Structures are given as C-alpha cells and as structure tokens.
Image (cartoon, rainbow, N blue to C red):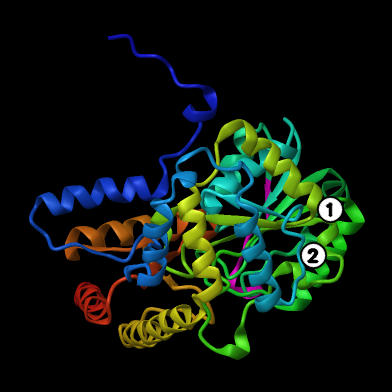
Amino acid sequence: MTAFPMADRLAALPPYLFAEIDRVKAEVRARGVDIISLGIGDPDMPTPDFIVEALCQAAKKPANHQYPDYVGLLAFRTAVADWYKARFGVALDPASEVVSLIGSKEGIAHFPLAYVNPGDLVLVCPPNYPVYPVATGFCGGEVKTLPLIEQNDFLPDLDAVTDAEWARAKMIFVNYPNNPTAATAPRSFYEKLIAKARATDTIVVSDAAYTEMYYDPADKPLSILEIEGAREVAIEFHSLSKTYNMTGWRIGMAVGNAGLVKGLGKIKENVDSGIFQAVQEAGIAALRHGEPHAAKFRDVYRERRDVAVAALTRMGITCRTPKASFYLWCKVPAGQTSAAFVTRVLQETGVVVTPGNGFGAPGEGYFRIAMTVPVARLEEALSRIAGKL
C-alpha cells in the first residue's frame, strides 16, 4: 500500500504529550501493573444528575435533531452572558460578544486561523497548554516564548519583549489559573498586560478554563474582561468541562471583543456545524443551576490538595500549595530530568504523572500531578512514589 507523506505542518509536530504517555502506560499495563493515572486533567467525578437529565429531555425534542446554529443557540449565549455578569460583574451582549465552542480547545485551536498570517509574531508563555504554539504553527506564525519561572511567580516578564517585538506581535496567549503550574495572576498583571496590548494593538487571548477551581473565596480568579479597556483587545475562552465535570460533552464559549468573536465565528462557519442543541440546553441548565455542585467539587479538590501537598512534603518533593486548578507543579528530585523521573515512576510504580518539559522547555525539572482520583487512590499513588525515592 502506498505510504502518503504527511503535510509539513504535521511532520514538524512533536508527539502529542498525552498520546506518548498513553503509549508507555499501555506497555506497563500489559505487564499486569495496577495503573493509577495522575496524568491527564480529566475530572473523575460524574456530571451532576440534573445536567444529564436536562440532556435526556432535550434530546427527545425533534427540533434539536437538525443542524444547530454555528455560533450557538441564543439561549445558550444568553446563559453565558448571565453567568459572566453574576460571576465576574462583566456585562456581555449575547448576540455579538459570545460564541459557543465544541470545548474551549477547539476554539483556541481555530482562533489563530482568523488573525494570524504566515510570519506574524505570536507570544506564548511556556510551560503551557500545547495547543497555543501548535495552532500558531499551523497558520505559519512565528512563536516567541516568554518563560514562566518560579522566581517570577510563573508570570511572564512582559518587559522582556522589545518594543520592536510588541510592534510585530499579533497576539499573546495567557492562561490563569495556569495549566500546568497552577499559578494565578493578580489584577496588577492583567492591568499591565491590557495597557501594553492597547498601546501596541496586540490581541490578548485569555484561556480561563480553570477560574472556578479555586480553594478560598478570597482567591477567586479574575476574568480578564474585568480589567478596564480589556474589551478593546481581549477574547476569553472558557469551558463547562472542568467546572461541572463535563469534559466529554465538548461545550465551551469564547467571549469578549465583538470583532474577535465575529472572526472566530467566521472560521467556525467554515469548519464545523456547531454543538448538538440538546447539549447546549444541558449547558444552560449547568450555567443556571450548577454553582452548588461546583462548590462541592471544590471541597473535594481542596481535601485532595491538602493530602497530596502533605505527602509530597514528607517525601521531600517541593511543590507550591495551589490557590486554584486541580494541578500540583512539583520539582523532580535533584539530579534527574523530568522525562527520566516520570518514566521511572511509571515503570516502577504504575503511577502516571506528567513530565514538565512536555509543556515546553521551561518546564524541565518539574512534573505535574492531576488530582483526579479519590483520596484513597491518591494516597496510594504517592505512597508508591515515596517508596521508590
């Protein structure tokens, strides 16, 4: 059979991080090892019953069996706008400042297609979600990295970008609460970023998928749209995936600058046919009535965080106690690389954690734990790791 060469854009890609982990995991499982996965950020708790019931009822409606609107039901976009108003105090026009997404990853991956031309400069802050540089590369864009380092509280140094680079920059991706570092961003950072973006006509792409996974009400993460002037330059991507344990449902939203939202909507008109309307109706139910459930999920993750941080501290592994997200960003033991440590842990203990360098070069020397198993399994996993240090 003829082997057709892939397009250059695919041939240039590194192996997708989680796909490679799955490959090694399969090899270990084949040996009969009990696998405990703390790798992918996929909530282990089920979607609340009332959301499932809303889907079941909506799926019975014949009107929902036809093609949906590309940009989403106005009722869903209105629910998003109402949620943003209640949660962040941000007023949005659901008709022009909200677009539905088949999960936030889809929207983030497609957004550069609307604005990045070959040779355009895009600022990316590693360690980061791999989609940002990949989507940029698919458009022929040039990536400049602003490393997130612990000494700077895992915030990018905006002053490290020269005036000439800011003048060229088409957009900058930021993600807080951050995956993988679990860092949060203060208002002062957003204010500086928005001021710089307005002065240089740079699009700010805010990935805010983890804002509802906080541990103390005093530390509630911001929406970038709370910052004065942000609506002139920013688009924010959000999702129901982590907030309501709906990762498999593939439903999210992008909000903000009407022109940017329209540009993304134009791409979506040409590459997808929208979200199944029954899923959107379930999403409306989640946004309208899901906060008590989200609060319970936060309590579960808080217990897991406290158990895990205590166990890691006892075994001499350094990690910050996160204020948000369900990730722990940990330093590998001295003298070991991220990949070597993670591979040894998986092969010797059956515990899956994620190498920090898989999120970009500045992640070298770290590994990420996703707290997506019950406390008993989490304790078992950390006990196995402790036994091999």
Q: Please rate how many residues cluster around mark 2, counting C-alpha atoms within 10 Å: few if below 14, some from 14 to 19, many from 20.
A: many
Q: Badge 2 is on which residue?
A: 193
Q: Badge 1 is on which residue?
A: 162
Residue 146 colored magenta? yes
Amino acid residing under circle 2 = Leu
Mark 1, secondary structure of its residue: loop
Residue 351: image quadrant is bottom left
Q: Residue lying at the far right in this picture: please name it.
A: 199
Q: Is residue 360 above or below residue 153?
A: above
Give the quarter of the figure containing the C terminus: bottom left
Q: Residue lying at the far left in this picture: please name it.
A: 32
Q: Is residue 66 above or below residue 128?
A: above
Residue 114: image quadrant is top right
Side (left or right) of 90 relative to 49: right
Q: Residue lying at the far front in this picture: please name it.
A: 62
Q: Position of residue 275 (x, y in %)?
A: 51, 46
Residue nearer the viewer, 85 or 320: 85
State whether residue 181 appears in this view.
no
Instruction: Give the magenta part as a residue range.
Output: 144-152
Side (left or right) of 205 relative to 165: left
State whether residue 254 appears in this view.
yes
Q: Position of residue 11 (x, y in %)?
A: 47, 27
Q: Position of residue 112 (x, y in %)?
A: 67, 41
Question: Which marked residue is nearer to the observer: mark 2 or mark 1?
Answer: 2
Residue nearer the viewer, 262 or 55: 55
Question: Which residue is found at the position 65% from the left and 33% from the top?
Answer: 139
Spatial CA distance of label 2 from label 1 is: 14 Å
Mark 2, secondary structure of its residue: helix
Amino acid residing under circle 1 = Thr
Question: Which residue is found at the position 54% from the left and 82% from the top?
Answer: 323
Residue 241 colored magenta? no
Q: Is residue 24 above or below residue 38?
A: above
